[in-house]
Image: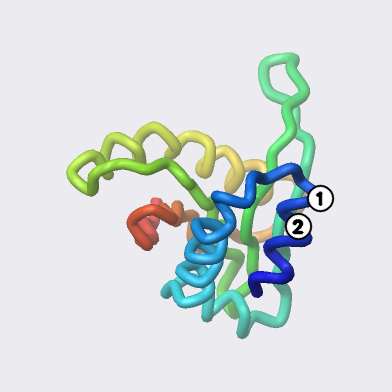
Amino acid sequence: MLLLVSLVSEEEGLLSEYQEEVINTVQAIAASEIWRPGQQAEERYHEFSFLFHKNHEQLQGVIDYLFKEEDGWVIVDYKTDTFDVKNLDSFVNYYRTQVELYGMELEEKVQVKVKEKGLYFTSLNKYVVI
């Protein structure tokens, strides 16, 4: 994994001093409770980009992790903010509208059922359902 991170870091201009942090984050995500069901899904997407219009503006959204379960789609948005767990609720509230908007747009424009929307906070290794 170090070789892969080194190659991507070089390509993306990431300083080598952050490589260990990147590896730790990737390993934490891969071991998370929300990663496994997505990997078992028949359909899954990473960095699912879409455009939508709100209030006469064109906006771009990127769903970090999107996968289909038997009863609907699951949206996961990764957040890399570093903060104390006691501030979790304020970060959830800060990002709530973004994830809810993603869900509404997916249901409206793609005509699919979104069964769950959530935030995965990498610094806490914590998934929160919205």
- Residue at the extreme bottom of the image, as rendered: 40
| Number of numbered callouts drawn | 2
Q: Secondary structure at mark 1?
A: helix
- Residue at the extreme right of the image, as rendered: 11
> What mark, if any, has residue 125 been given in the picture?
none
Identify the residue position indicated by label 1 in the image: 11
Q: 91 or 6: nearer the eye?
A: 6
Q: Quadrant of residue 124?
A: bottom left
Residue at 30 percent across and 41 percent down: it is 83
What's under tag 2, amino acid-wise? Val
Residue at 55 percent across and 50 percent down: it is 18
Q: Is residue 108 left or right of residue 34?
A: right
Mark 1–mark 2 CB contact (< 8 Å) = yes
Identify the residue position indicated by label 2 in the image: 8
Q: Secondary structure at mark 2?
A: helix
Q: Is residue 26 left or right of residue 109?
A: left
